[in-house]
Amino acid sequence: MKPTAFWWRTFGWAGVLALALLTGCASTITTKVTNFHAWPSDAAGATFAMAPSDGQTPELEQATWDAYVAAELQRQGLVSAAAGSAARFVVEVTATGYAREKKMLEPVYQQTTVFVPPYRDAAGNVLGGFWVPDPFGPRWVGDQEVSRTVQVSRIKVRITEPPRAAGEKPRTVFDATALHEGRMGDLPDLVPLLVKAVFDEFPGSNGRVRTLKFDAETGALIRR
């Protein structure tokens, strides 16, 4: 095999590997979940009701977020209270999405070249050397600070027990927030994953912050 063929074939495989690594990084959605709770030990089979809308979120949008959370609560063994009946738990759901500027460090790569020395072919002719791209691809030369617009999507779920006597205040038994920051992603697409993150291992460990990753294509939780 001539040196030129060797170098270009090696360079081609290095490019394919780099592309595969980049594709793999882009296929997950990372969420950060903050969890606080004082979940009752006798909550199995208890009823719940969604809190009335505060009017700040469009009615159909709020109903959609509530439905996602209600479905997860039912998977946890709770029962949706019949209309007009008192529920043991009241569930408040708040979803927000906004863009913000974020400073971050990004790696800087530089494509270098390497010199292939002169060589003698099969006929005895000496061919001059030449420069080719580094077969191992671009090399990291440092980091630079950049400002990027990131989309922040957040959902907060708060569950309370209504007062049992006059003068008492509602008692919060579960309060969790799931957050995703990324360069792209619309709130309606991300809320189902954020709700899954909130209820993963429900009610979870009190006072913990967990990082969860989901497959961007299937929405499945990636467990390591």
Image: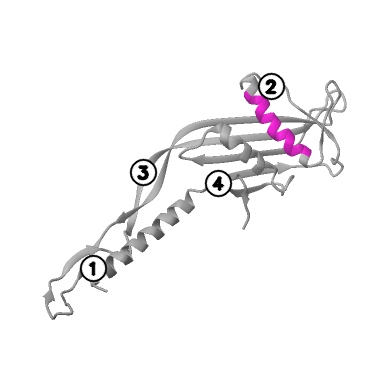
For label 3, the residue is: 146
Sequence order check: which comes first, mark 2 or mark 1?
Answer: 1
For label 2, the residue is: 53
User: What is the CA distance from the residue labelled 4 to the residue labelled 1?
Assistant: 43 Å
- Visible in this render: residue 135? no
For label 4, the residue is: 30
Mark in front: 4 vs 1: 1
- The reply to whether the C-beta atoms of the residues labelled 2 and 3 are less than 8 Å apart is no
Q: What is the three-letter code of the residue carrying label 1?
A: Thr
Say what secondary structure mark 4 lies in: strand
Sequence order check: which comes first, mark 4 or mark 2?
Answer: 4
Kindly identify the residue that appears in the image at 68 percent across and 25 percent down: 63
Mark in front: 2 vs 3: 2
**Span of residues in magenta:** 61-74
Q: Position of residue 135 (x, y in %)?
A: 30, 65
Residue 48 position by quadrant? top right
What is the number of the mark on residue 4? 1
Q: Position of residue 184 (x, y in %)?
A: 47, 38
Sequence order check: which comes first, mark 4 or mark 1?
Answer: 1
Q: In the rendered view, tell whether residue 73 sits above or below residue 212.
A: above
Q: What is the three-letter code of the residue carrying label 4?
A: Thr
Q: Is residue 64 magenta?
A: yes
Neighbour tally class for label 2: few under 14, some 14-19, many 20 plus, Cα within 10 Å: some
